[in-house]
Image (cartoon, coloured by chain):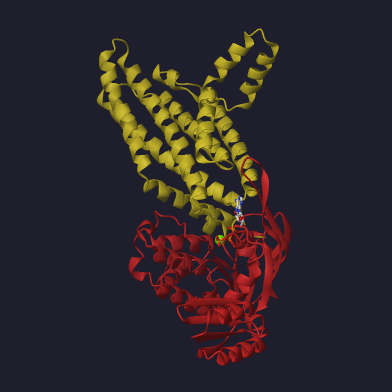
Chain colours: A yellow, B red
Amino acid sequence: MTPLFQPLKRVAVLAQNTLREAVRNRLLYNLLFFAILMIASSVALAELHLGDRDRIYRDVGLSAIAFFGALIAIFVGINLVNREIAQKTIYTLLSKPLYRWEFLAGKYAGLVGLLAFQVVVMTLCFLGVLWLQNAEITAGLFQAIGLIYAELALVTALALFFSSFTGSYLAGMFTLAFWIAGHLLADLRSFGAHSEVEGLRALTEALYWTLPNLDRLDLKSEAAAGLTLDTGRVIAAGAYAACYSLGLLLAAAFVFRRRDFQ
Amino acid sequence: MSAIRTRGLAKSFRSGLRARSVHALRGIDLDVQEGEIFGFLGPNGAGKTTAIKILTGLIRASAGEAWIGELPVASPESRRRLGFLPEGTFFHEYLTGREFCDMHARLLGIPRAERADRVQQLLIRVGLEKSAAVQIRHYSKGMRQRVGLAQALVGDPALVILDEPMSGLDPVGRREVRDLILGLREQGRTVFFSSHVLADAEMICDQVAVIVAGRVVEAGYLADLLGGQVGGVELVAEGIGEELSAELSRAARRSVAQGARHLFEFSGEDTAEKALDRVREAGGRIASLVPTRRSLEDLVIERSAPETDR
Ligand SMILES: Nc1ncnc2c1ncn2[C@@H]1O[C@H](COP(=O)(O)OP(=O)(O)OP(=O)(O)O)[C@@H](O)[C@H]1O
Ligand SMILES: [Mg+2]
């Protein structure tokens, strides 16, 4: 039996390679550039607005971090996994003595590390804007950003799951659809609950409990209003995202194990 | 012990929307002995890459079994001492040659202290030491093939599987790869390589298997395959009439006419003798008469003629 640390070492090698590829990829810098541009533009937006300016800074900044983070998670994530398969670079890797799940785990670890870097960069820009504008920096902001990161990790797991059995176009569409649906689940459920059709109500209820509920991870409006939430609730939401991601990764590993590479 | 053994290995692909099955492999048995160079030969689409992908764990056989050494190919441990060069040199473009080799060395668990040295040795061996710090995206086809070979050898493999290692190389490059393969055998490694260029194989292989349309049609030691059978006799005659030319063409297995020169290839010596007499009788001139050795190419062309499906 191989000791566990050997697979982990190989996962680390693959993760490092994923990071290296991302760092040498232009798409990433373009997305990051727009994210920073958008965070900075919150200043101009607040100028046009009469109400609570701090709230606008916080709202636009958090939304930019979440939105561009998700774009990076979906497009860079799918790009990096599928390209390895479509361009056949995976052949030399899998001909080494490693289990296929190690490949997925390495990709995932690399991508999650990449997203951590992204979120930190965007957060620093965001805090810089708040500081320059003398806006209050509350603990709630960090709670919101922490859960945005949890959401991004979950979206990456979705992207990896779809990439484990389909090409980049479909995987991108599916992940995008799940991401959007994940934010609309509460609305969808109440729509179903008010519906006359019995089947529709059962369907929306089923979707509500099976699709990833990304609303749970969304504290943007609370944080923008300057509120700080109970830590227990934040941790519970984070644990939900972690479990859901783990489930997706296990499913991806199961599918990937049986896949033919051609 | 065999380095590679397969029994009844088969693979079919369901292709496209019509869900019609393509039988890429229809049950092949191979026995590759340790320490020899094994040529896996066949025309395009014969199923060579498909078989190699099964051996290297990239696809799963539909039926049959395959082992590397003692271990079934489904086990990752079977790849512990396996080096593999895939067809078509699709490598991580964003890595430099050195980073690429180093990454594979790390996946093999080679300790840090040894790694840099070993990678450097290999880069020198394949002639890439000057381009080691250049990204693979800037490499020429030949350089890619070399970096792929370096990657395949980085784990000190007992068995090296090379899918079309000479394709796309110029004559000098082909010769270098040939010498490299011979060098690997000298070090006691087993080499299994596929090719459709038979001259390459004829020069260096101990054993070959010829595969056509997913079946092994010829297999064994090259010396047995080519030596045992009678070759042909090639006769070039000049100054013979139309009539005689037509008569000899019927007796020959191949004939070519160019101006006054006629070339006939006879499969047996007696037919050639008879033809020789007929030419002399008719007052023709014999330009040359040579026994032809049977080449691997003849063998493959003979065996693939009836059922090619390309
Ligand atoms: N993924 C696939 N789906 C459908 N058919 C396939 C697939 N892969 C291979 N085939 C078919 O299997 C047969 C064998 O292909 P393979 O690539 O193994 O041939 P090959 O001997 O390596 O040829 P070449 O010398 O051109 O590399 C071909 O007819 C090919 O069309
Ligand atoms: Mg091939």
Percent position (x, y) of residue A80? 46, 45
Q: Is residue A216 visible?
A: no
Percent position (x, y) of residue B292? 57, 85
* Residue beneath the point at 68% across and 67% down: B216
State whether residue A257 is above or below residue A157: below
A196 horizontally vs A239: left or right: right
Percent position (x, y) of residue B310? 59, 57
State whether residue A181 is above or below residue B135: above
* Residue beneath the point at 45% across and 21% down: A228
Q: Nearer the viewer, residue B266 or B189?
A: B266
Percent position (x, y) of residue B121? 42, 73
User: Which quadrant of the figure shows ligand 1?
Assistant: bottom right
State whether residue A158 is above or below residue B139: above
State whether residue B177 is above or below residue B67: below
Q: Nearer the viewer, residue B267 or A7?
A: B267
A98 horizontally vs A75: left or right: right
The quadrant where residue B142 appears: bottom left
**How many numbered marks, from 0 up?**
0
